[in-house]
Amino acid sequence: MTKRSPRTVFVSYEELDDVPSNPSSTATFGDIVERRFSRRRVLQGALATTAISAVVASFPFAESRAAMGSGLTFPEVEHGVDETHHVASGYEADVLIRWGDPVLPNAPAFDPNNQTAAAQEMQFGYNNDYVGYLPLPLGSDNPSRGLLCINHEYTNEEVMFPGIERQDKDLQFADMTRALTDVEMAAHGGSVIEVERGGNGKWSVIADSPYARRISGLSTPIRISGPAAGHPRLRTSSDPGGTKVIGTLNNCAGGMTPWGTYLMAEENFHGYFTGDIAGHPEERNYARYGVPANWYGWGKFHDRFDITKEPNEANRFGWIVEVDPLDPTSTPIKRTALGRFKHEGAETIVNGDGRVVLYSGDDQRFDYLYKFVSEGRFDPSNPVANRDLLDRGTLYVARFDADGSLAWLPLVFGTGPLTPTNGFSSQADVVIETRRAADLLGATPMDRPEDVQPNPKTNKVYMALTNNSKRKVEQVDPANPRGPNLFGHVVEMSPPGGDHAATSFGWEIIVQCGNPNDPAHAAVWNSATSANGWFAAPDNAAVDHRGNLWITTDQGTNWSRSGTADGVWLLETEGELRGTGRMFFRVPLGAEMCGPVFTPDDETLFVAVQHPATDGVADYQGRGRGSTFADPATRWPDFNDGMPPRPSVVAITKSGGGALGAG
Ligand code: FEO
Ligand code: CA
Ligand code: CA
């Protein structure tokens, strides 16, 4: 998500004053690229030195997946910004479901002028981020019928509600009422919908599906499991046992497990809390997470979001939530063994020995990459054995070393500095204060780790690092080689022998984002990348079933730096074209591109268009101000004067059929 600034209206957390004025900020990059950039490809960019080219030329192209052919087959979409979406020629992009559309049976028709929490709890929520596809029946590879599991990350009140505008120096939307606040809360969470591809090749939502479900921030009870369950630091006045919380919030990306459950990653949970931190019993803990951030005014109407009134509620957010989408009556579970931080996502892979490995980035500037290795083993024939795999195992944090190795440091109570001397009395304390534990272990502060995506074809793992405008020249390191890093980069990690449980990996940077033809960007791409093929602010990622890596971007308000709206790009990772990007889809003005996921036949790519009309529209064509409900910069996707812009899930298929990016 785009972060909200506590200070300035319509300028994101990535403040505009971070634009570099000093080109010498990249002075050390040449040395670093020589050490840590892949040596297998031709580099393009200001720092593709002769020395590097010589190394490149001497290395063989020996990747296995390359033999399958590159996915770079589609005509490119051009960089640009306008009021609607664009997909590569020869492909079709159809809106499948929009904010306010019915999810549950008997959901009332969407009426943007008369919203209620009761209606919103039956309708599709706001800001769709993660999208997972679960083929039906469970265990099949059905590419034409399945469940879509969709996160609703946050809300944009200024374009959701008539008459609600952001107040200067007060992003709490002072005019919000209790009733509208409850609509906001109900618009958070997730949706499970059943979808089907018809004979005409088009997708539709199955009305009144028995699987249909809304999970909301307002009302859904969620169980807490794992080492922190029941701990005194999780107990509240309404839950003295510390095992049940209402709602899940800021669900950004996520993942689908091998056993068919849906993981929702709680990211910027700090934004929902208000109150006074000075002298608070959780002051050190909360300060490390930015609690309270005062983005919303929920604490005015719900005491639990005021840390002064309910001191432990903020410890009950920042977790991974596991949902069984096949049972709409099941209680979702917050799995505390996976740690508490601003989880971007939660992608899993079954290791060769059957253990499950889950990767998750902590999306904040200078925060860390984590993985969890289960103690038990995945058993496809025994669903009961898999049910609580995410409750027991080892959580690790990453340290990227200059020699190209990556050390996974265990976050285990009683080992190293994680002892009572440093305020940890149990594993519960370690997971509640995951960030502080990782600080003590010496993890590498990264440039905002977003989606972390394993490629089952190659066993490589890809991490999107979106940007870090605050990294200073003296803070660069081999894994984060630009200061400031305004455009982000993509890191490839290599488990030895494909062993995702190993405690040492290899790593290298695939691309350094930004415009390779602008020396000030210090961008590095394969020279085959066109003027539209480079991107900025990589965020979410998907690997198709042939092993192609697709990246989506979230530039926030900073898209004027690149001159293009966000979108989907294919990033070649193998062979001679490794490090080449190509633009496949572009979102409308002010939106972010999320949720890429392929059906098992790779014939459909579902994507999620978040917050159209919001980010950076003040900069668009001299508009000079942001969007409001009455005057949004775009009314995508309906383009109907009575209808506000609506976050929507889009299904992309090839005209006439066939896999995306094939042939
Ligand atoms: Fe919700 Fe890191 O984006
Ligand atoms: Ca994101
Ligand atoms: Ca992903």
Image: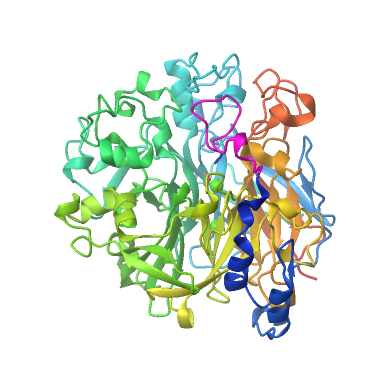
Asked whether, in this view, residue 448 is left or right of residue 204, the answer is left
Q: Is residue 65 above or below residue 439?
A: below
Depth check: give the residue in front, 204 or 603: 603
Magenta stretch contains residue 451? no
Location of residue 311 in the rendering, given as x and y in whole percent from the top left corner: 24, 31
Q: Which quarter of the figure has residue 103?
A: top right
Taking depth in this image into account, of 50 and 1 the one nearest to the observer is 50
Residue segment shown in magenta: 3-21
Residue at horizontal 27 percent and vertical 47 percent from the top: 224
Number of marks in picture: 0
Q: Is residue 553 left or right of residue 633?
A: left
**Image quarter (top left, top right, bottom left or bottom right) of the C terminus:** bottom right
Residue 540: x, y in percent?
A: 58, 53
Towards the viewer: 628 or 483: 483
Q: Report the predominant secondary structure element of the magenta stretch.
A: loop
Write the residue at 51% across / 29% down.
120
Camera sees residue 272 = yes
Rendered-image quadrant of the N terminus: top right
* Residue 315, image x, y percentages: 29, 40
**Residue 634 visible in image:** no
Q: Where is residue 286 in the image (x, y as percent from the top left)?
A: 31, 38
* Residue at (48, 59) in percent of width and height: 256
Question: Which residue occupies 53% across, 48% down?
Answer: 472
Look at the image and name its color scheme: rainbow
Residue 15 within the segment the image draws in magenta: yes
Q: In this view, does 200 lie above or below 73?
A: above
